[in-house]
Image (cartoon, rainbow, N blue to C red):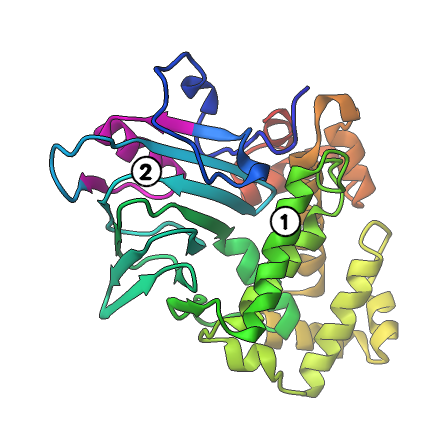
Amino acid sequence: MTSRLSRLRFIDARRTAGPVRRKVRSRGVPPALAQHEIFYSEDVRSAAQMLGKVLSPGSLTLSSPGERGFAASLFGVRLRDISMLYLDLTVAATLDIPVLGPYFTICMPTNGRVMCHGKEITIEANTVQALVTSPGPSVRMEFGHDSPVLVIRIEEPPLAAHLTRLIGRTLPHPIAFEPAFDLAEEAAMRWNTAVQLLHAEVYYAGSLVQRGQGIGAIEELLMSSLLHLQPSNYHHEFTTPVVRAERRVITEATDFIEAHLSERITLEMIARSVHLSVRSVQQAFHDELGLSPVAYIRERRLTRSREELTDALPTDGVTVTSVAQRWGMHHLGNFSVEYRKRWGETPSETLRR
């Protein structure tokens, strides 16, 4: 039976499903990922190419050229916008990535250490300190011998959209986290708990995630935990939000929209929910979010549609028409055009994937 957790969408994992020679090892793989191997290779160049498809293009070199025992393995699952990955290179090696793609990673070695070099920073990631990468800057990761890493990957656009909704305004600058994440602090237990919850939901058959439910809630928990715990250029604003009339209006209005997203929503209904005029609501959206209430509603409906189409399996009986209508978009042609413009593919392509 096809699994909701088998569609990583980074590479075609079927190409790695053919018979291979006996593997060096696969110890230490988290139980939830043990049945989700993306690739295994004992060839450095091949491993670099596969890592480039899952992360970002780069180079992989052995610290001791010609060293025997190299075997790269990568296991992982992706929900919607968050992935849990486990990378093991077995021997000391260096991964150079010139430009990180549009995603954040939290890299947590489960053994050994990884020395990380970026623009003006060098930190050691180990079992008590994680590395957090942000999109754009280059990174060099020097893996020690026997230093496997658990990686939580979060796509940039959904995290930015999540933060925008929480603080009630557009982000003038991309999110950038500080790279060192102290996992030994008491507060970090909340991050560890969120990761353990993700692991449990992926591992146990019949869980909400396995049934295609609760995915959004778990992803939001992980994103909110990271934003709350890890210093960033928006950390102060996120943890101590400014109470302004405009922000209050946006928060209350967007809460109303979320609660009625599958229903008919008019500007008058939004205005009544926040006890303001239609013009005042429009002005607040323009000033804080840089778009109109109608555009915001369309964006949220397109997002919800994508989530439902992404999670669907053939056995669910989900159709593009039913999804569009469920989220208040009754003109299928317009829906398809807007969907493709927003996500770069048609609703049918998302559903078939």
The stretch in magenta equals 39-61
Quarter placement of the N terminus: top right
Q: Position of residue 242 (x, y in %)?
A: 62, 86
Q: Quadrant of residue 52?
A: top left
**Which numbered circle lies on residue 52?**
2
Q: Residue at x 70, y 26 (%)?
A: 313
Choose the circle earlier in sequence order: 2 or 1. Answer: 2
Verify whether residue 58 appears in magenta: yes
Q: Quadrant of residue 173?
A: bottom left
Q: Residue at x 43, y 68 (%)?
A: 181
In the picture as drawn, the residue positioned furthest to the top comes out as: 19
In the picture as drawn, the residue positioned furthest to the left comes out as: 65
Q: Is residue 112 left or right of residue 304?
A: left
Q: Residue at x 71, y 74 (%)?
A: 250
Position of residue 51 relative to residue 261, above or below, is above
Residues under labels 2 and 1: Cα distance? 25 Å
Q: Is residue 160 left or right of residue 91?
A: right
Q: Nearer the viewer, mark 2 or mark 1?
A: 1
Position of residue 339 relative to residue 186, above or below, is above
Q: Position of residue 154 (x, y in %)?
A: 51, 52
Determine whether the residue tagged by mark 2 lies in a helix, strand or loop. Answer: helix
Viewer-nearest residue: 88 or 212: 88
The residue indicated by pointer 1 is: 198
Residue type at mark 1 is Leu
